[in-house]
Image (cartoon, helix red, strand yellow):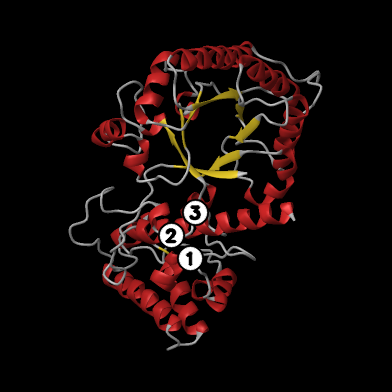
Amino acid sequence: MKFIFADSQDFVDPGYDFEKDAYSKGRIIQRTDKYPHEMFEKKPYDGMLVSRAILADGVYKTSGAYSIMQSQRFKREGASKFLRYKDGPIFGDSGAFSYVKLEKPPYDNSEMVDYYMQCGFTHAVAVDHIIFEYDNRFDGDDPNFEVSDEMQNRYDITQSNAKEFIRISKEKNASFEPIGVAQAWSPKSMQEASKNLVEMGYTYIALGGLVPLDVDQCEEIVAAVRAVIPNEIKIHLFGFAKAKQLHRFVKYNITSFDSTSPLIRAFKDNKYNYYSPKEHYTALRVPSSEGTAAMKRKISSGELSQETAKTMEKESLNAIRQYDRGEIPLEEALDKIVRYEKLFKPKIPEARYRETLMDQYWKTCQCEICKDVGIEVAIFRNSNRNRRRGFHNLWQFMRELEELLEGQTK
């Protein structure tokens, strides 16, 4: 079961000055910044995925993470060179979430094959169209569930594209491995879609539409599909974020899954955003005194002075570092953190902060991020800290996945 990381131009400045909160001199975005795989000796994922939706290539207007210049360079240099990644597969897909509101996908199959070949992807996903409605009855005969014309149309579009995509790929002697996508509304319809893909000639299929489903629904679909296709047919799970439930899926011989969850949780999860093997911790929130809306409102209304906010911000950061060096007790550091955060947030996770400070996981973690920046990784503040914590989470997740798979083979 391979972990494929979906890129969205997530990198950090390796020379970032945490004391001054300043970028390194001579920094050039993307060129001198480092991707997750460039920060670790042990890989933080088995492969990468680049959605066409993050490119600004003029074919379909999206708010992509790549600029026009970066998109042009991506096509010119190819995925491997652009990403500076040579240690695993690089998947490409059309980014169905970006055009979910359209009646049909904006990409032509022949043009997509050319795009995949130009960029040198090792694996290329046929153009699909997401179906969000889901019937959790296996037999699909729930009297309250109706297959709408739109759902059927999206199913048909995805199947038709898959058939044309693999034909064109063979005609153009494409070097990538084609992947057909199954989009459906129930385990039964997903079975049908998957069987059709195998009959078309696909040896690698992907199951889409899993993101909004709970883990039981996901397993029901995977079990249903595996029951009707040969065991040698490879299965990829799109957007599979059920990290703690992966053990339930090993028995279905899943080849790969993609997720950004470990990285995203570093800055979007307010509770468990700093991974460890036993439990996930809560990073210590110390935002810039000039960066929060609540703080700005208090300052503009005269309720709080800018000088007071800056002083308390500095005291909070200093207290965290002093505690890390053993110069002040935990409760003194925690008091400074809580007092500052209360300026802009009424409810503070004081107990979780205490646990983070008490366990000091950054001192025992073996990843390069924790060894390099120490307690800074556990501070919820600006992108260079939060992304580093996200990189750490990727590394930690990958180690746990390796242990899970090793345990299954014993």
According to the picture, the residue beneath numbered tag 3 turns out to be: 44
Q: How many marks?
A: 3
According to the picture, the residue beneath numbered tag 1 turns out to be: 367
Q: In this view, does 72 lie above or below 189?
A: below
For image coordinates 67% across by 22% down, the residue present is: 194
- Of residue 319 and residue 66, the one placed in the foreground of this image is 66
For image coordinates 38% across by 34% down, the residue present is: 54
- Of residue 169 and residue 222, the one placed in the foreground of this image is 169
Whether label 2 touches label 1, CB < 8 Å: yes
Mark 3 surroundings within 10 Å by alpha-carbon count, few (fewer than 14), some (14 through 19), many (20 or more): many
According to the picture, the residue beneath numbered tag 2 turns out to be: 40
Q: Where is residue 336 in the image (x, y as percent from the top left)?
A: 43, 78
Residue type beneath disc 3: Pro
For image coordinates 37% across by 74% down, the residue present is: 317
Q: Position of residue 368 (x, y in %)?
A: 43, 66
The quadrant in which the C terminus is found is: bottom right
**If you read the primary sequence from the N terminus, does the residue marked by circle 3 or circle 1 appear first?**
3
Mark 1 surroundings within 10 Å by alpha-carbon count, few (fewer than 14), some (14 through 19), many (20 or more): some
Whether label 3 touches label 2, CB < 8 Å: yes
Would you say residue 342 is visible in this rendering?
no
Would you say residue 335 is visible in this rendering?
yes
Residue type beneath disc 1: Cys
